[in-house]
Structures are given as C-alpha cells and as structure tokens.
Image (tube, rainbow, N blue to C red):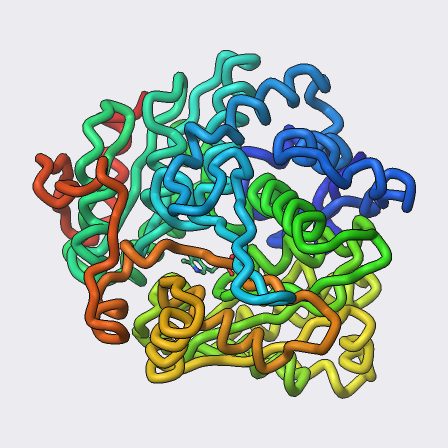
C-alpha cells in the first residue's frame, strides 16, 4: 500500500515513512493510493469482534509495512480496559468505546474514557506506542514540538511520557485553558515532558511551532517531529471506533447508521469518511460545529471561507477557523485531482476562499452523505440540561453540540450515534451553568489541581525556544 500526497508532487511513500512527519513536502497531506475495501463476507466476520480484533482488521489494511505480529502486539498493548479505564457507571470498560443507548435508535459513543478524558486519547495512545516501536527499530530519537489550547497537549504528553527516544516540547498559552486542563499537563513529572508556558496567546504558540518547523536545518539536526491532527496514523486509528459503534448499534449488516461528530479540524469526521470508503454502511456523517462554523457553511453552500478571527466559545476544543484535515476529503470529492487541490489551497493559503459550485463539484456532496449544522452557547446549555433531565446522562458541551445538530438530522429507522468527545468533568463551568451540579470526576483525579507543577514560563521568542530545545533535547 502506497500513500500519495493530495497535491500530487511529493514522492509516494509507505506508512512508516509518513508516520513521523507532518505535511508532505509539496504542502499536501498523505492519503492511501486506493482505499482498501471490506467485502460483505469480511464485514460479516467482523461482527462480534472485540475492539482489539477490529483494530487489527482495519489497521492491518492501512499499515502493511509493520509485521502483523508486531502490529497486533502494539494494538493489544494500547486498547485495554486499563488504559481506557474511566468508564462511567453502567459502561463496560472492556468495550473500550462503550455505546450508551439513550432511547431506541439514539446512542452516545463514549470515546473519552482514556487518561485525559477526551477522545484524542483514542488515537494518541496508539501513536505513542507506534512511535516508540519505530524509533526502537531505527535506534532513532525524536523531539516532538507542538502547541495546544487544551486537549491535544495533554493527550500527547500522556501518550509519550516515559517513552524511550522521545521528548515532548509542548507550548501552551499562559491564559485560556481551564485549571483542570493546565493541571493535567503541568503536573506530569516525567523527565521527557517539557511544558513551555508562553507569555502570549495560542496563536503565538502556533506561530513559534511553525517558525521552528520551517527552519529545515534545525528540524533535521534536532529531529523535530509533530503529532498534530493531520498525522495520518491518528486519522487511521480513529476509523476503528466507527466500525465498533456500527456493530454495537445494529443487528445485521443490511442496516446503516448515521454518526454525529463535534468537529474542529475535521480529523474525527475524516476518519468516518475513511470507514465509509472502506465499506462500512454509513448513511449520514453529520458535521456539527460551534460558532466557528466554517465547515457548516461549506456543507450548506459549497463555499469554503476560513475566517481571520477565531471566536472563543464554551466548546474550546472546536475553536478552529481552518480545518486542517478537510483537504483529505476535498481530494476525494474532486475525484483525486491534485492539480485542482493545489489551485484551491493556493487561494486558501493566500487568505482567500473557494467555491465548488462553479464547476459543479458541489453537486457530488449528496454522494458522500455529509450534512452539517451548528450550535451556540445557549443551544449547548439547553442540550446538556435536556439530556440530563430526559435521559439521566450528563454530557460535556462538545458532545452536546453533536447531539443538538444530530437530532436535527435524525431520520426514522436509521440509528443515530452521537460521538462523546470529552467527559463533563473537563468542562465543569458549563455543567454548573446548565444543571447546577458539580460533575463527578474519577477518584484518582480528585486533587489534580493541587499537585506540584513542572513548567517553564517563557516569552514568545523563537530563538529562546530553540535554545531550550537544544539544551533539553534527548
Ligand atoms: C479535538 C476535539 C474536537 C474536534 O475534533 P476534530 O478532529 O478536530 O474535528 C471535538 N471535541 C473535543 C472534546 C476535542 O478535544
């Protein structure tokens, strides 16, 4: 299996060759040359498999340059009830992603039972084990540099802590994250984890990461790697739970289901698109955005118009105005015309927009079954309250966004599965506002904010950050 770039001018590579890098060197994103496809018989055989068995079936089609026994061992080590241990009462942690049924035909898929209580652990824990395995083979070392406004940083640090050959340098803004999110990162005491708290805002953190990554000589000398949401292994690993949820919500492979996905960078829903390309009977993928509704606008109008300003909302992990994985989907929609993608993203990268109506491309949207909607703060608070009152289930504001938009697109006879992307404990302000209760958090995390913290407060200065990496790198 080869991987090709969406912009058509980078070499074709194998899975292990695209694992550690970010963008292809023509600025595009790697995707499979052709999607592997499960036959009806194969899908029938997958019904009844547990999470690890399903993960092997799906990932061994996408990763064919790691020996099968090794891949199986990496999967078996990752997807355990011990790693995804924060299942709620009534959920079976052995399911890894338990399916909660609110009422017949309406479900919530628990994706946030991992160490940082957000769905990013689903792929990031696998990535940590995969990186360690590959670096072990090559006796290599990697310095992961990233910027976070919340969930990505903690998921990456929990996945990479204590791993041989890997150091993490995570930039976060001095203000803006919740105390719980800060404590999750800064309380880690592992030597290979470096929290750089920047006197500035998230955009400055991200600009520093870009500046360092664009210094190709520094990048090569100091073996700088990335774990941001365009990482193909993350997208691939996320497609597994679409299969798991489908089999849990249906009795027969003649049925189809719809998924509602709280979206920011289009990573999660892109994994759903890939599951469908691999043959999973998905009816609709429902893209749910918050007030940063650039994706909702696209799926309604065919116009993609990234905004210069990002709004701060009560679903901060979706506060994104340019959806980095979106290019993978548009590549398929444009019949994999790399020339076309280059033209479209040239416009976007120079601050503009594109309109797919002009050449009739947007007419194909029906074929891909993606619909969309958005929520505002009041909608999310209402949804948290209603879901609690009617079903006795507490959901976080991101999940509430997905439920609100999902219900608007619900169709009779088609099971609707809403993705739970974080646990309510992470966003307690919204829970208090909606239902006046303090969300329960796992007992082990009771005193998280009181633990000693390990962080380096620094100015937003590229030179100083580079110097820090040189001194501390593994
Ligand atoms: C990252 C995140 C999202 C958005 O996921 P994308 O893959 O970026 O679309 C939604 N909810 C939560 C809680 C997240 O952490």
Q: Specify the quadrant of the image occupied by residue 439.
A: bottom left
Quadrant showing the C terminus: top left
Q: Nearer the viewer, residue 288 or 309?
A: 288
Task: Indicate left or right for 233 with 341 as reference.
Answer: left
Identify the residue at image location x=65%, y=45%.
244
**Residue positioned 70% across, 77% down in the render:** 411
Could one spot residue 464 in this view of the protein?
no
Q: Quadrant of residue 357?
A: bottom right
Point 49% across, 49% down: residue? 111
Q: Between residues 329 and 356, which one lies in front from this camera angle?
A: 329
Would residue 470 appear left or right of 253 to someone viewing this image?
left
Q: Is residue 425 visible?
A: yes
Picture coordinates of residue 408 (x, y %)?
58, 82
Q: Quadrant of the N terminus?
A: top right
Residue 269 appears at what percent x and percent y? 60, 60
Residue 386 left/right relative to 68: left
Please name whichever residue, 264 or 202, is drawn nearer the observer in this view of the structure: 264
Residue drawn at the location 60% of the way across and 75% of the way down? 347
Tally of marks:
0
Q: Position of residue 83 (x, y in %)?
A: 42, 31
Placement of 373 over or under 130, stated as above or below: below
């Amino acid at each position: 299996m080869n991987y090709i770039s969406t912009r058509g001018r980078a070499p074709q590579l194998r899975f292990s060759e695209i694992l550690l890098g970010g963008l292809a060197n023509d600025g595009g994103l790697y995707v499979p040359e052709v999607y592997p496809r499960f036959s009806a018989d194969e899908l029938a055989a997958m019904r009844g498999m547990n999470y690890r068995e399903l993960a092997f079936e799906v990932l061994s089609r996408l990763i064919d340059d790691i020996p099968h026994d090794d891949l199986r061992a990496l999967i078996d080590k990752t997807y355990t009830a011990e790693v995804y241990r924060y299942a709620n009462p009534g959920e079976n942690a052995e399911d890894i992603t338990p399916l909660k049924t609110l009422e017949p035909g309406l479900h919530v898929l628990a994706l946030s039972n991992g160490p940082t209580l957000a769905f990013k652990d689903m792929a990031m824990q696998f990535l940590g084990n995969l990186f360690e395995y590959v670096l072990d083979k090559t006796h290599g070392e990697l310095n992961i540099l990233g910027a976070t406004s919340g969930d990505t940083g903690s998921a990456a640090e929990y996945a990479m802590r204590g791993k041989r050959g890997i150091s993490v340098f995570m930039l976060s803004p001095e203000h803006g994250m919740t105390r719980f999110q800060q404590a999750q990162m800064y309380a880690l005491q592992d030597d290979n984890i470096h929290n750089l708290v920047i006197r500035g805002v998230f955009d400055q953190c991200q600009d520093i990461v870009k500046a360092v990554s664009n210094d190709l000589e520094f990048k090569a000398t100091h073996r700088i790697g990335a774990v941001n949401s365009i990482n193909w292994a993350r997208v691939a690993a996320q497609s597994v739970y679409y299969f798991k949820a489908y089999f849990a919500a249906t009795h027969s492979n003649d049925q189809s289901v719809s998924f509602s996905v709280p979206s920011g960078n289009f990573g999660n829903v892109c994994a759903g698109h890939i599951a469908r390309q691999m043959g999973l009977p998905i009816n609709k993928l429902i893209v749910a955005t918050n007030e940063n509704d650039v994706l909702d606008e696209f799926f309604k109008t065919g116009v993609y118009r990234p905004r210069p300003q990002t709004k701060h909302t009560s679903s901060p992990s979706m506060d994104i105005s340019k959806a980095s994985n979106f290019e993978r989907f548009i590549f398929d929609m444009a019949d994999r015309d790399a020339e076309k993608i280059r033209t479209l993203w040239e416009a976007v990268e120079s601050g503009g927009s594109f309109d797919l109506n002009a050449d009739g491309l947007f007419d194909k949207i029906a074929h891909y079954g993606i619909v969309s909607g958005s929520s505002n703060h009041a909608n999310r608070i209402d949804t948290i309250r209603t879901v609690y009152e009617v079903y006795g289930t507490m959901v976080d504001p991101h999940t509430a966004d997905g439920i609100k938009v999902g219900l608007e697109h619900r169709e009779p006879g088609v099971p609707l599965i809403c993705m739970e992307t974080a646990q309510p404990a992470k966003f307690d302000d919204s829970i208090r506002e909606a239902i006046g209760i303090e969300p329960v958090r796992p007992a082990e995390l009771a005193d998280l904010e009181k633990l000693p913290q390990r962080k380096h407060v620094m100015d937003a200065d590229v030179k100083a950050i580079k110097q820090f990496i040189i001194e501390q790198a593994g």
